[in-house]
Amino acid sequence: MIQGTVQTYDPRRGTGYLTPAQRDDRFPFVVRPDEAGPLSAGDTVEFSVGGGRAGLLARDVRRVRSAA
């Protein structure tokens, strides 16, 4: 699993972007509310990367530490 930080998250849509800790890439992600719990910008998460229809996508997003 890769660790990173949530940059943006829209809880109504369940979509956002995150940045891996060791790289400058940005990956989009989609989660259902029951999968990752409540996320917010600045949260530390673990995730894997896989192919999506439009390129790479963060998958299996799970919060490790809250930003608050």
Image (cartoon, helix red, strand yellow):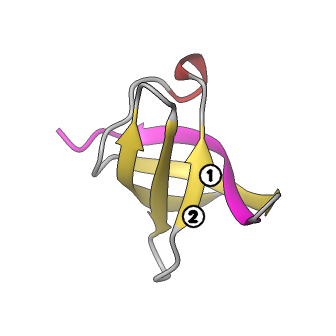
Q: Secondary structure at mark 1?
A: strand
Q: Where's residue 17, x and y in %? A: 47, 56
Tell me the residue that label 1 is attached to.
47
Q: Where's residue 41, x and y in %? A: 29, 47
Q: Where's residue 52, x and y in %? A: 80, 57
- Mark nearest the camera among 2 and 1 is 2
Magenta span of residues: 55-68
Q: Where's residue 37, x and y in %? A: 47, 23
Q: Quadrant of the N terminus?
A: bottom right
For the residue marked with disc 1, what is the amino acid? Phe
For the residue marked with disc 2, what is the amino acid? Phe
Residue 27 numbered tag: 2
The residue depicted at 73 percent of the width and 66 percent of the height is: 56
Q: Main secondary structure of the magenta part?
A: strand
Establish if 36 lies above or below 68.
above
Instruction: Check if residue 66 falls in the magenta segment.
Output: yes
Q: In terms of depth relative to the viewer, which is nearer, 57 or 62?
A: 57
Q: Earlier in the sequence, mark 2 or mark 1?
A: 2
Query: How far, Cα to Cα, is label 2 from label 1?
Result: 10 Å
Establish if 36 lies above or below 34.
below
Dividing the picture into quadrants, the one containing residue 28 is bottom right
The residue depicted at 76 percent of the width and 64 percent of the height is: 54
Q: Quadrant of the C terminus?
A: top left
